[in-house]
Amino acid sequence: MVRTVLILLGAPGAGKVTQATRLAESLRLPHVSTGDLFRTNLSQGTELGQKARTFMDAGKLVSDSLVIDMLFDRVGQPDCAGGYLLDGFPRTVAQAEALQQRFDGGEDRVVIDIQVPDELIVERIIGRQSCPKCSAIFHTSFNPPTSAGICNHCQTALTQRADDTAEVVGTRLAAYHEQTAPVAEYYRQQGGVCAVNGNQHPDKVFEACQVCVTEAAA
Ligand code: AP5
Ligand code: MG
Ligand code: ZN
């Protein structure tokens, strides 16, 4: 059986979770976000969450071994047996190589790189609000909820992530350029990356991502 493994690359705030949610639904693939897995661990007070917290709050990448163990544990679960969608992993070449080694040849790998200029990232990050209950994402200017500060879907009060500040976003962007941009180059050499312009309406970004998936299957 061929398993689709869809990998979404992109800077912080590029729109990975925005697109991953839609793509996971349309392709019927489980959405696996390493950032969300860490945040769940944090809110549950696990040892892993405690270890990750210092890195995340500072905007730095969590060490490869912690991320890889957590990710492999997640994608080893039965719901991922038919494929999965990765959001926020791999973020270093070492993570990409570890994932590649885990594959057994039955994977149909699709890599999408959502590209957004740095100067637009800060505003996206600082205005982001998320729902702690249903995980819906909003933006104070670009995608405001119907009632300010309240989730459209479940009426819960929206919250802001601890790392979504003007100070931390600079470190996150630096980590992206130093450690994650080379991952796109790694995949370019390994058979290809589908680049998508992330600086357009989310519906248009979604259409472009769907074209990447269709072309990869052809
Ligand atoms: P993670 O949770 O992955 O954060 P990130 O990469 O910094 O990305 P974001 O979640 O901030 O952005 P996004 O691309 O999902 O954008 P979104 O769709 O929300 O990681 C957090 C931390 O965990 C890391 O810093 C690290 O410490 C650790 N970590 C996680 N994975 C790791 C790994 N593999 N290795 C090591 N450490 C790891 O969009 C952003 C905003 O823009 C939203 O408000 C949205 O509404 C808006 N928006 C989206 N699309 C558009 C559009 N087209 N036009 C206008 N606005 C838009
Ligand atoms: Mg995200
Ligand atoms: Zn909600």
Image: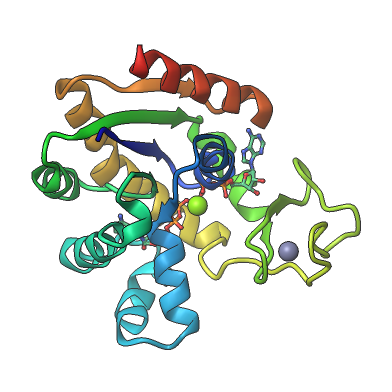
Q: Is residue 189 left or right of residue 109?
A: left
Kindly identify the residue that appears in the image at 24 percent across and 46 percent down: 179
Nearest the eye: 178 or 144: 144
* Residue extending farthest right: 147
Nearest the eye: 120 or 147: 147
Say whether residue 201 is visible: no
Point out residue 71 in the picture as x, y percentages from the top left corner: 27, 60
Point out residue 74 in the picture as x, y percentages from the top left corner: 31, 63
**Quadrant for the N terminus in the image:** top left
Point out residue 109 in the picture as x, y percentages from the top left corner: 27, 31
Say whether residue 83 is visible: yes
Taking 119 as reference, is 45 above or below it? below
Q: Is residue 202 left or right of residue 81?
A: right
**Quadrant for the C terminus in the image:** top left
* Residue extending farthest front: 1
Kindly identify the residue that appears in the image at 20 percent across and 66 percent down: 69
Taking 128 as reference, is 196 above or below it? above
Kindly identify the residue that appears in the image at 53 percent across and 19 percent down: 208
Count the numbered circles shown.
0
Taking 29 as reference, is 50 above or below it? below
Q: Is residue 18 left or right of residue 107?
A: right
Point out residue 4 in the picture as x, y percentages from the top left corner: 33, 35
Quarter of the rendering containing residue 123: top right
Q: How is the image coloured?
A: rainbow
